[in-house]
Amino acid sequence: MFCLVAAGILILLILCLYCLKLKRSTAFLRAELARKDVDSKQTVQMLQDWVRMKQSDGNIAQRLVDEGIHKVVLYGMEENGQLLLKELSQTAKASGKSNPAEGTGTDENSVRVLCAVDVRAVGIHADVEVLKPEDFDPEKAGVDAILVTEPSRFEEAKRRYADRRTEVVSLEEFMV
C-alpha cells in the first residue's frame, strides 16, 4: 500500500514540475510573439513610409547624399536589405553605374554600398560582399555610415559599433 501512495505522490510531483515548465515556456513564447509583433509593425510602418516616399518621387539615395552619406554598409540583408540594395542599384544604373558597389562614393550625387553585414552572412546572395558582424570593421572600410535596414536591429547595431567613430543610422530616418 505504501508503494502505491509513494508512486502516486511521485507522479503528482512530476506532473507539477511539468506544469511549471510548461507555464514558463508559455510565458516565454508569449513574450517572443509580442516582440515579433512589435518588430513586424515597425517594419510594416517603415515599408508604408517607403512606398509613400516613392509615390511622391522621393529617393533614398538622394536623401543619403543630402545628409553627406556617400559610402554605406547595409546592416541586415533580410527583405528590407535586399530591397534597399535593389533600389540603390537602380539609382546607380540611372546615374550610369551598373551596380551600387561601382560608384566612387565621392560623387556629389552618388551612394556606394561597400558591403553588407548580416549574422547569417553565409548563404546570402547579393551584388555586394556579405560579412558577419564580427568580421566587419567600419573604420578599416572607410564608410560614412552603417545603414540598418531592419528597425528591430537598430539598437543591436548601435551597441555593436558604439566604440567606433562610424555613424549608425536607421533606414527609417530617411523615410520621413
Image (spheres, rainbow, N blue to C red):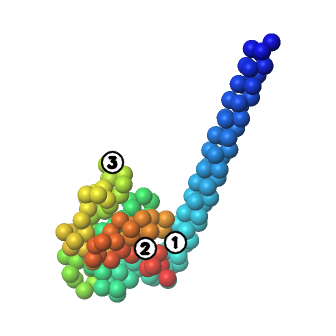
Q: Is residue 118 left or right of residue 48?
A: left
Where's residue 125, x and y in %?
32, 53
User: Residue at the location (45% across, 82% down)?
Assistant: 57
Where's residue 63, x and y in %?
38, 83
Residue picked out by circle 3: 123
Which of pointers 3 and 2 lies earlier in the amino acid sequence? Answer: 3
Residue 11 visible here: yes
Q: Is residue 36 above or below residue 15?
A: below
Whether residues under marks 1 and 2 lie with C-beta atoms below 8 angstroms apart, the answer is: yes
User: Residue at the location (21% across, 69% down)?
Assistant: 141
Task: Name the residue type under label 3.
Answer: Gly
Q: Nearer the viewer, residue 117 or 134?
A: 134
Q: Is residue 91 above or below residue 121?
A: below
> In the picture, residue 126 is in which quadrant?
bottom left
Q: Is residue 105 left or right of residue 48?
A: left
Q: Is residue 108 above or below residue 3?
A: below
Residue picked out by circle 2: 171
User: Residue at the location (67% across, 41% down)?
Assistant: 20
Task: Name the residue type under label 1.
Answer: Met
Which of pointers 1 and 2 lies earlier in the amino acid sequence? Answer: 1
User: Residue at the location (65% across, 50% down)?
Assistant: 27
